[in-house]
Amino acid sequence: MILLRLAFASLLARRITVGLTIVAIALSVGLILGVEKVRNGARASFANTISNTDLIVGARSGSVQLLLYSVFRIGNATNNITWQTYQDLASRPEVAWIVPISLGDSHRGFRVMGTTADFFDRYKFRSGQSLSFANGDPFSDVFDAVLGADVAAKLGYRLDDDIVVAHGLASFSEHKDKPFRVAGVLEKTGTPVDRTVLVSLEGIEAIHVDWQGGARSGPAISAKAARQMELTPKAVTAAMIGVTSRLKVFTLQRAINEYPEEPLLAILPGVALQELWGIVGIAEIALVGVSALVVATALLGMAAMIFSGLNERRREMAIFRAVGAGPGTIFMMLMLEALLLTCIGIGAGVALLYTGLLIARPYIDAAYGLYLPITGLSAHELTVLGAVLVASVVISILPAARAYRLSVADGMTVQI
Amino acid sequence: MQRATTLAAIIAIALPAYAQQDRQLDAHEHGVGLLNIAFEGDQVAMELEAPGADIVGFEHPPESDEDRAAISGAIAVLATPLELFSIPDAAGCTVVEANAALVGENADHEEHGHGHGHDHAEEGEHKEHADEGEHKEHAGEEHHEDEEGHTEFRAEYLLACTAPDTIDRIAFPYFSQFPNARELEVQMISDKGTQGFEIERDSPVLSLEGLI
């Protein structure tokens, strides 16, 4: 106990160098934990985005790509699925429900997704949670739109406001003649739905009735006239499918993948996610590696500080020896100093992490749609901290051993 | 004779058109097999697809008695799913149905093995037969070249388990059974959703804790 007090007092006496070392350790610990939190947060956020959907069907491309554009609205489809094929799939006996997804237009930086009202029942996130409305109802009219929570919050829309959909994802041509009415606003979900404007498939079709090949062609057709027209879509981008029995899911997957009339791809969302982690995993390892190196650097800095302190403390050590401390006690005291330093550093690092998370969370959420939950330290993170502590003990053996040797050799006649 | 020539001409004209429409080829990677597992109630359905090279070490048509013995031996082994994919005893799984077959271009004379075949499954297989037959009829030699002589073993299993929720792991004696198999890509669906795994020869265990 007295050793602990001595060590603490000794650290306090050298508060500037010690303080800087603690800051270095805290920063490195904060970094390694931060990387860990963001990594796990990203995984959880991705994994929580879609649940209870058995298959996702799109044009044949890569499974990761299909997952990214259909669920996460990242990137674009290579091709669409024709409506006839969609109908074909919908009528298969294995299909319990099918919800179409039609992408391609945008509204002030947010993607517009055409779908059916079934989407609100069938889309599930975070292990089975359903979408719920903060305001209003699902779309019932051709020109009704339902806004994700972020869209409504960022653009300040209320129910019954008119919004104009832009053609394409970053273009200046807008469907001004056919505005949509905000029929509902969804509750925040922490998924890409928050940043999506949902409209009916008919709505998507209606705003494009007088368009051809990406540009307006022929005489303009008014919104009123468009309503009267046949608004069966020609194609959808992708579809989410639930099967009647899980035992049928692979049969259906094979049938879709071998669908002769159109090259299609059916994926199990979890399988594509796993594939995605396989790709992202390499970058993750690099990040973890770099932050581990930063921790090592901070610990080496601490060892260097203790080393350089040894010389000026030779008299101090000699006095300890004179009052009866054996060389072993000196060794222990130095080890204790290092341990104390690391512990304070780790504590400060954890505090830094949570303050950082608290401050940065809204920005990360807004900019990347990545919702980082503030949770306690996981078992894995505690292991990391334990490893840092062990590493600090191992590293501080070097200066402590040197102090031990010096204190044996020096005696009282120290020449400084 | 005249008629035969005309017929040949018609076929010759028709052939390229057909080939153009139907020129698709599945990926085929030696060493890598696919395994699908579906959990529904107390039933577990599995499908295995593995390249001939993984299972018997060759993909050419059986030339010798030895080849034929290897194939029928492999099919017999493939018809015993619990010997290949070992499920904890506590789950009380029994095989309801197990079918294994060699499919692909060189398996001209397809061989099938039935563990405990049921009518339903046989029907399915017959359908497959019919498809294959059709292909050959239309595409003839074209089809041969397309497939480049790859063969695949396919197996379907249906298990009934008394306590499927106690399945926390599946071990893969499959790899010791078939020394040429390197990897299995696993797709799984259960109450908890869909999952993907890669099972490598080095660590032939799939941990399913909390996933069923």
Image (cartoon, rainbow, N blue to C red):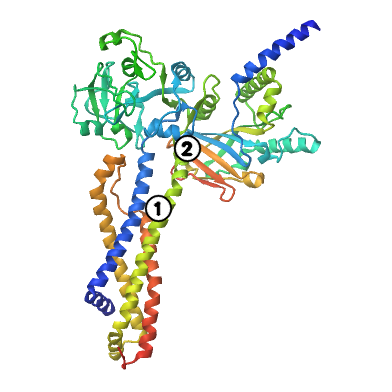
Q: Which percent across, then down, holds residue A411?
A: 34, 92
Number of numbered discs: 2
Q: Give me the residue at 36% from left, 80% from top.
A: A331
Residue closest to the eye, B50 or A398: A398
Tell me if I can see residue A297 in this picture.
Answer: yes
Q: Is residue A89 left or right of residue A362?
A: right
Residue A108 is labelled as: none
Measuring 39% from the left and 71% from the top, which residue is drawn there? A395
Circle 1 crowding by C-alpha within 10 Å: few under 14, some 14–19, many from 20: some
Q: Which comes sooner in the sequence, label 2 or label 1?
A: 2
Q: Residue A52 or B181: which is nearer the viewer? A: B181
Q: What amino acid is at disc 2?
A: Val
Is B88 rendered above or below residue A173?
A: below
Q: Nearer the viewer, residue A349 or B193?
A: A349
Chain ID for label 1? A
Residue closest to the eye, A33 or B112: A33
Residue type of the residue flagged with mark 1: Leu
Left or right position of B163 against B177: left
Please name the residue that numbered disc 2 is placed on.
A271
Residue A140 place in picture, x, y as percent = 27, 17
Res. A51 image quadrant = top left
Element assignment for label 2:
helix
For residue A287, which numbered disc appears in the image? 1
Q: Nearer the viewer, mark 2 or mark 1?
A: 1
Q: Are marks 2 and 1 on the same chain?
A: yes
Q: Position of residue B185 (x, y in %)?
A: 55, 40
Rendered position, A381 above or below A158: below
Quadrant including the C terminus of chain A = bottom left
Between the residue at mark 2 and the residue at mark 1, the CA separation in whole angstroms equals 24 Å
Residue A264 rendering spot, x and y as whole percentages? 50, 25
